[in-house]
Amino acid sequence: MLPVRIIPCLDVRDGRVVKGVKFRGLRDQGDPAELARAYEEQGADEVVVLDVTATTEARGTRLDTVAAVRARLSVPLTVGGGIGGIEDAAALLEAGADKVAVNTAALRRPELLSELAARFGSQCVVVSIDALGHGGAPGGDGGYEVVVRSGTERVARDAIAWAREAVDRGAGEILLTSIDRDGTRSGYELTLLRAVRSVVRVPIVASGGADSPAHMADAVGAGADAVLAASIFHQGNWTVEGVKEALARLGVAVRPGYREEVSA
Amino acid sequence: MREVAPTVTVVRTSTANLASVLTGFERLGCRVRTTADPHKVTRAGRLVLPGVGAFAAARRAIDAHGLADALRDRLDRGHPTLGICLGMQLMASGSEEAPGVPGLGVLDCVAGNYESGEEGWRVPQMGWNLVAPDEGCEIVPRGYAYFANSYRLTTAPDGWHPVWCEYAGRFLAAVERGPVVGCQFHPELSGDYGRALLTRWLEA
């Protein structure tokens, strides 16, 4: 296993980082490029930029934001939001994304994942799955459904079956968000993680609910290869560095800083 | 410090990930240009062959622009060249990903898939892994580098200094021969580690 990747997530609207609870009540958190740079300096292993309103407002992800983040960032950058087809993905990659996270468009037309993988390689294609526990009780009956359009629309699709199909079609990574947990800081949805882990071999990025390194360690134990968090970083509860130190104490392997490694 | 900003020429055969490579060198103060012209590939002082995506498609793109001879020639002559990820695999004889499609043949080995069926190893390898240069390596440092790959080389080709890494077995993280370097990982996405590597390559 590789060291777990710690991934700050920048939810961007109109060129600014925002954050809400369960995708609602968005509040301003800062400039995406400045935040991305700061997180890299803290030891972030990767950064995710999601244009949270791109699909609902029927516009493409803002390429200028991606280019601005890229100019400052020298770790991997995944971008999602409003990717409707191959050309949207190509434009984002050209602007500086290393991976594209596809959600709604892939559900509408799953062949899109195969087409993206054929053109850019599977390692470039992330399927973003927003999952909701059936009946509003997370995992209560052991089932999860897929929701889209930033959690506003149900699509009558089983999340675990969709994860498996998306990987079969060419997705090289799964960004797995629990809508029940998003922004609640009550911990990742471990039952969901275990269920998806049991059906795919690609890396899984756990998302939704992180409040502490202990939550992240739990996610790793449930099969996550990377943990994404937004609120705890933006609001200064934790630095990436602090998270890594705490994870190391919990026995979870993390990437040390370069100078640390060289001097060791 | 260098007095004049070095110019780095990046082969443009596909769209993906190019911006990361370009901005990576720009942050180091380089002037960066892209080309798909074989004459410019031949004349470039420092050339980068990036690559993500499929082996066969990348080879087709090289052929479509008539770049194979120019690339092979400068690699053989030891002109400063950096192959990244698929760009390194293209330096090999071929890949199990695309049987029958030849690589540039500068590295006498074939890219293979990670062992299938083995439990616990995610494919693609996606994340940071510790790379360890053999004695004699002068450009690739020891440290954590970012990988995103499903195929890799496992045998050290004659005449090259190997840099090793472990993932479902030992594989080649990089190879060096003077200022010619192939990296399976992405130095442009490897933070401080990558900056250190690229700086050494620019000075090699």
Image (tube, coloured by chain):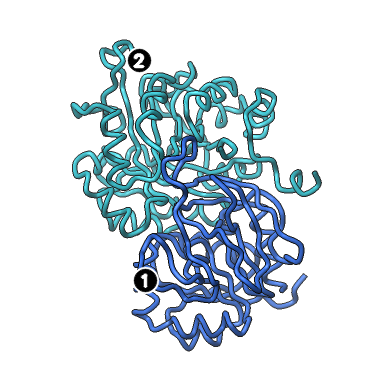
Chain colours: A cyan, B blue
Q: Chain of mark 2?
A: A
Residue B154 horizontal/vertical position (percent): 55, 58
Quadrant in which residue A255 is drawn: top right
Residue behind mark 1: B101
Is any atom of residue A126 visible in this view? yes
The circle drawn on residue B148 is none
Compared to A193, does B18 lie above or below?
A: below
**Which amino acid, by three-letter code, is at mark 1?**
Val
Secondary structure, mark 2, is loop
* Residue B91 locus on image (x, y percent): 51, 71
Side of B97 where A248 appears, left or right = right
- Residue at x 35%, y 38% (from the top left corner): A128
Foreground label between 1 and 2: 1
Quadrant where the N terminus of chain B sits is bottom right
- Depth check: A220 or A82 in front? A220
The answer to which image quadrant residue A212 occupies is top right
